[in-house]
Image (tube, rainbow, N blue to C red):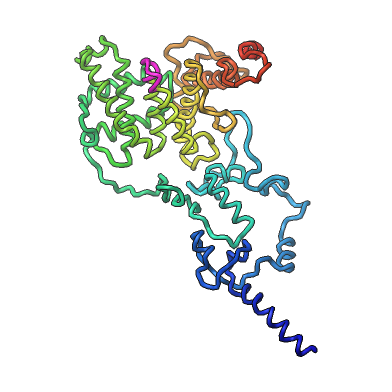
Amino acid sequence: MQESASPGATQAHPKQLGTRRHACDRCRRQKLKCDITKPCSPCVRSGFNCLTTSTPLRKSKQTQKVRAEKRPSANQPRSHLPAPSTSPLLSERPEGPVNRPRTSHSPSSYRDGDPESLPWTHRYAQISAVELTDKLFRMHNTASMVSPTETNNTSALPGGGARPTRGSDDQVNERSAPFISHFNGLVLPSRQICDFLLQSYWKSVHWFMMIFDRSSLEKQYEDIIGKQIVTPRQNGVAVLLLMVLALGARYTSEEQGSQIGLTEQERCLLQSNMLTQVRAHFFEILDAGGLECVQCCILLSTFDLYNGKPNLALPVIGAGIGSAQTQGLHKESLWAPAPEGVLEVRRRTWWALYVLDRFASITYGRPSSIVDAHCSVSMPRDMEDAQAVHPLLNSLEYSATTHPARVTLGSYQRYKFELYTIASSIIGSIYDLDSPKLGDAPSGAKAEEQF
């Protein structure tokens, strides 16, 4: 009986063993019906590499026990670990006002373009939803395949590929070209007139909208305009300098121009010609990115805004905000290490963009694009050029620790930034942008109550 029953038992069992033996790893994990032929149909349809190994689906109890012993106990410090009640990828999201000081961490520990080198709080702030989903899958299934989104690759998206980064380790030996050859149709005036237009910008615009470090920009001006040579890396700065000179021409009076032999007609032609070049290269600098791209958007949109062209100004402001957020300019803790002067220019640029966004919202009653809760950049500090007394204000600045003193360029900017931060919370109520529910008090009444 035992001998007769034994063949029957082995007859049914080999079929089950055969199915398990031939099933690939992916079909075993996802409990799919696998083919004997390799690669199997499910893997071919999904585009996965069909692999068949002897790796067990579940870790043994002994392995789980060893891992549990290695985990820190509840009595050990857990400052570097996520909160136990939330997802480790989304926990500890930074909150607070937009002018909150930057999170303290060692700049040398950050590697540009590598989110794993950031502090835990901000480690996943710069990755896409596709990358975040991929990391979640691989957290719960270590045997899963690495997604193309790893290492900043977007080849899984239409037209995607490896996303280039602009690091400091790029090739320095670039082929330079004459400045005028880069701008087809540009009529560049003499060096004397260019210098005059730059000084006109400092006198008319810099005090009102401080986005540069004066000494740094003048050095770039000398390297490009003075030598009349531009490298591919300097293309964005070259366009930015043309925008600066165009604004200098815009605020040069007929009397001032006559002092250097510049007629009013010539001044207008210079301004128009330079602006045409800036607009012609606008998408080029957007694609290249960099801080100069955001600065150019600020200046160009300001020109359009103050010259009655809001239909141009507002989209350019939006382009500047998008470029700034792409570079992580909205959150200081994401910045790569740099000299203090470079960090200060980043702060100035971000806050100038913030004020411009709020000013456009107030002026035209449209929603602002920058969300305070998503930003964290500290106020600009006083560098050498910011300590000069404001040329147009006779006001005194009072402090609990110092005697009353004249308002400087730096303090004027900070007071303006703080004012727009306060106004930001009630802009939506004033212009009925918060979509009140039926039965709520009118937005005007709410605004009056907040005031």
Residue extending furthest toward the right: 1
Residue 90 in percent (x, y) is at: 63, 44
Q: Is 448 situated above or below 163?
A: above
- Reply yes or no: does residue 231 show up in magenta: no
State the residue in front, 161 or 12: 12
Q: Is residue 2 visible?
A: yes
Left or right of 371? Residue 76 is: right
State the residue in front, 63 or 96: 63
Left or right of 265? Residue 388 is: right
State the residue in front, 336 or 36: 36
Residue found 21% across the figure and 16% down from its top: 260
Residue 58 in percent (x, y) is at: 68, 65
- Numbered label tally: 0
Q: Quarter-wise, where is residue 377 in the image? A: top right
Q: Name the image quarter holding the C terminus.
A: top right
Residue 269 in percent (x, y) is at: 23, 19
What residue span does the magenta drawing correspond to?
Answer: 303-312
Left or right of 168? Residue 82 is: right
| Most common SS among magenta residues | helix
Residue 389 in percent (x, y) is at: 45, 16
Q: Name the image quarter holding the N terminus.
A: bottom right
Q: Is residue 227 visible?
A: no
State the residue in front, 347 or 328: 328
Residue found 60% across the figure and 21% down from its top: 435
- Reply yes or no: does residue 309 show up in magenta: yes
Residue found 56% across the figure and 52% down from its top: 134
Q: Is 245 situated above or below 391?
A: below
